[in-house]
Amino acid sequence: MKKQHVQLTDTDQDYLRKLLSKGTLSAKKQKRGQALLELNKGASYKGVSNLIDVTAVTISIWAKKYKENGLTFLEDKPRTGRPVGLSGTDRAKITAIACSEPPKGYARWSLRLLADKLVELEIVESISFKQVGLVLKKMNCSLTESDNGVFEK
């Protein structure tokens, strides 16, 4: 007699079948859903791992997580790490200031001057001049003057 590693409720089975019939799932979510359905049918960890192309240990971890948390384990939890730096609005403000008139006494903006101005205007709490340069580079904005005396954007 085969050991059934996971026993899905009828509601969970229906949900997974409907979910897998859609074509817009992430690969992780699809693999996890398929693994649960196969385990529910009585397949072994090794059999499911060969079918889905992940290790048997991973399959056993997924089964354990399902038993503890239900179908919520299909979604990845937020990861720790460095928070997102600048929003799109912040990037637009940086570009707008770089394209504006430089302060009195300066012929043009420097990256360090821009970084200081952004902190002064409280657009950002802190920013390095290198990060300002990266933002401007991604926005195709140059701080150099072209031949006709106009700053390039």
Image (spheres, rainbow, N blue to C red):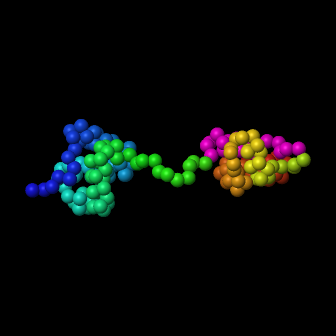
Given the current orientation, which residue lies at the most extreme right position?
105
Question: What's the residue at 87%, 49% (across, down)?
Answer: 107
Residue 150 position in % (x across, y down): 82, 46
Given the current orientation, which residue lies at the most extreme front position?
68
Camera-side residue of 19 and 145: 19
Residue 99 position in % (x across, y down): 77, 44
Read off the magenta span.
86-104
Q: Is residue 148 left or right of residue 81?
A: right
Give the quarter of the figure containing the N terminus.
bottom left
Q: Is residue 64 left or right of residue 81?
A: left
Camera-side residue of 120 and 15: 120
Residue 114 position in % (x across, y down): 76, 48
Q: Is residue 10 depicted above or below 28 in this figure?
A: above
Question: What's the residue at 56%, 52% (across, down)?
Answer: 82
Asked if residue 129 is among those painted magenta in the image, a careful observer would answer no
Given the current orientation, which residue lies at the most extreme top position?
11
Residue 120 position in % (x across, y down): 76, 43
Residue 140 shows up from this direction? no
Which quadrant of the structure image shows residue 101? top right
Question: What's the residue at 83%, 45% (across, down)?
Answer: 102
Asked if residue 101 is among those painted magenta in the image, a careful observer would answer yes
